[in-house]
Amino acid sequence: MNYALLYEVALTLVPGIGDVNGKKLVAYCGGAEAVFREKKKSLSKIPGIGEKTVDSILSQDVLSRAERELDFADKYGIRILYYLNSDYPKRLQHCYDSPMVLYCSGYTDLNVAKIIGVVGTRNVTDYGKLMTDKIISELIDDDVLVVSGLAYGVDTCAHCASVKYGLKTAAVLAHGLHTIYPPMNRNLARKILDEGGCLLTEQISGAEPDRENFPKRNRIVAGMVDCLIVVESASKGGALITAEIANAYDREVFALPGRVGDVYSIGCNNMIKDNKANILMDVNNLRSIMRWDEDKKVVSKQMRMFREFSEDEKLVMNLFEENAVVYLDKIITETSLSPTKIASILLSLEFDGVLSALPGKRYQKL
């Protein structure tokens, strides 16, 4: 039994905590196991932690359920990704409300250089199907990981196209890994795994695709990508919610334009009109905005020393002048930048080989 993982899973099962307060507890106590061993008086002093929550933690009733979850994961070869570990999606790690734990079927690298999300209406039109297939087919040489939600419509088209053209794809689910929803996508889920992709969820086994789980699923899709493409959407819908979250996380959002008056293009056209999404005419448009069309040669360490930093990046890098390793909390506290801005800066500095992320929300200057 991996006891560290047992307590990490158990903490997510305590009623009334949630991901934000769960991370706060870990930070205050020094680890998940330490939370359960902390005295009631000390736990009660932590901001945002009520007496009812403290009682739930100390009862430790969740440990037996967590043990069953670890047994389920071991039986079916499911990886459990804790938010402080290196295999957890780094992009998502920087989102303040990201899941503390993810359950992953498949061994896909969730920290590859390029990750895109593709979402849209369940009532996808022939135009939407055609454009989804075209976009994915033109990304073959970019070696991207395609993320979507395995729902009817655009999600299904995105996963199918990825399998068809040999791109790895991650399906983020709104339920536990004991089942597949919608049932019609069970074969597609198997193909995703067979082609090196993965199924990903924050829900424990037995959790059903209840209504409240879908917005939670959407934030995972939005947080683990570099950019989000909305293929088609009516004036309201889950795809627009995902796009709003992506914007809040400071991700690039793209939308395919459609004919004026077409029901399932209204959402995309409105986002473009309101400057909430870049217009996506073709994949070269995306490459240009994402800077994927720039020289991809590996920059030597000597050249990285002369990288020009923006003013915000300088605020972050100044913290590394006397310290080789700096905690994320220190960066947030001493720069006064928003968490989403800091996440974007750190990701850029990582990709450019200036900083390296370490376990425990720490960063090291290279």
Image: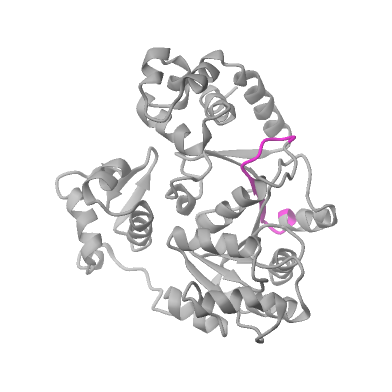
Q: Decide whether residue 201 is among the magenta residues.
A: yes
Image quadrant where residue 201 sits: top right
Q: Depth check: 364 or 242 in front?
A: 242
Residue located at (51% from left, 23% from top):
53
Image quadrant where residue 16 sits: top right
Q: Is residue 290 above or below residue 3?
A: below
Please state the extent of the stretch shown in magenta in the rendering: 193-206
Q: In the displayed structure, does residue 273 sit left or right of residue 329? A: right
Q: Is residue 225 visible?
A: no
Q: Depth check: 305 or 146 in front?
A: 146
Q: Position of residue 187 (x, y in %)?
A: 83, 56
Q: Position of residue 102 (x, y in %)?
A: 58, 42
Residue located at (51% from left, 15% from top):
58
Residue located at (29% from left, 58% from top):
354
Q: In the displayed structure, does residue 22 sit left or right of residue 361? A: right
Q: Decide whether residue 334 is among the magenta residues.
A: no
Q: Quadrant of the N terminus?
A: top right
Q: Position of residue 266 (x, y in %)?
A: 64, 77
Q: Depth check: 283 or 217 in front?
A: 217
